[in-house]
Amino acid sequence: MYSFFNGRIIITKGDITEEKTEAIVNAANSTLMGGGGVDGAIHKKGGPQILEECKKLRKNQYPEGLPTGNAVITSAGNLKAKYVIHTVGPIFKLDPTPDESLIQCYYHSLKIARENNIKSISFPSISTGAYGFPKDRAARLVAKFLENYIKNYNTPEIIKLIFYSLDDLKIFLEKSNWKKEEV
Ligand code: AR6
């Protein structure tokens, strides 16, 4: 586990479904009906309540699906977290502006967290799995965005980035070039 910016950002290797932060972010797809990767793991461990709420959101707010870069919130069913914030990352090869879309995911997820008074949030590495976003490019973009974010906003107080493998975590550490703190 690595800490940065007076503990406001934490980077760790792990399974996001085990996270105890108030909210976890789901790398969903626009159907909000589940899938593989993080999405599959969250629905599997969280149970049917999450899908029920996603179905309602589709019906009432997003009949055509949640657009790329947007985010919605549901409860977290049986997970340790209280909320799941679902966002849709860009499909790298199909999105005309993948960098902007990826940052929109982080921006909108954090906005929903603030609106719900959420104090801690965990992100997976959005779009870097099935959606094929290059990991080093995502790391540079996300690091720059978050560094700027914490200068402008005091909440959520704690932002965790969860990497599924040590290699992915190392890429982020290298590309962010942030100064590590003692934990
Ligand atoms: N905890 C933390 N990170 C994980 C976990 C986990 N349990 N499982 C995978 N990762 P992906 P995407 C990492 O494919 O690229 C789904 O089918 C993984 O190693 O989950 O945004 C959705 O329904 C990778 O680095 O999300 C969509 O259709 C990162 O999480 C599509 O995949 C993201 O990988 C979304 O693709």
Image (cartoon, helix red, strand yellow):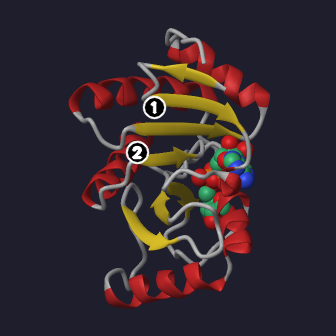
Q: Amino acid at mark 2?
A: Tyr
Query: Contact (CB < 8 A) between labels 2 and 1?
Result: yes
In front: 141, or 163? 163
Residue at figure coordinates x 66%, y 65% from the top left: 42
Secondary structure of the residue carrying numbered label 2:
helix
- Tag on residue 106? 2
Let me know if residue 130 appears in the view.
no
- Tag on residue 117? none
The 10 Å Cα crowd at callout 2, few under 14, some 14 to 19, many 20 or more, is many
- In the image, residue 57 above or below residue 10: below
Q: What residue occupies the far left of the structure in this picture?
A: 152
Is the N terminus in the top left, top right, bottom left or bottom right quadrant? top right
Q: Is residue 65 left or right of residue 91?
A: left
- Confirm if mark 2 falls within 8 A of ligand 1: no
- In the image, residue 81 above or below residue 101: below
Residue at figure coordinates x 43%, y 89% from the top left: 56
In front: 161, or 175? 161
Identify the residue position indicated by label 1 in the image: 142
Residue 133 image position (x, y, % from top left): 59, 40
Residue at figure coordinates x 25%, y 59% from the top left: 115
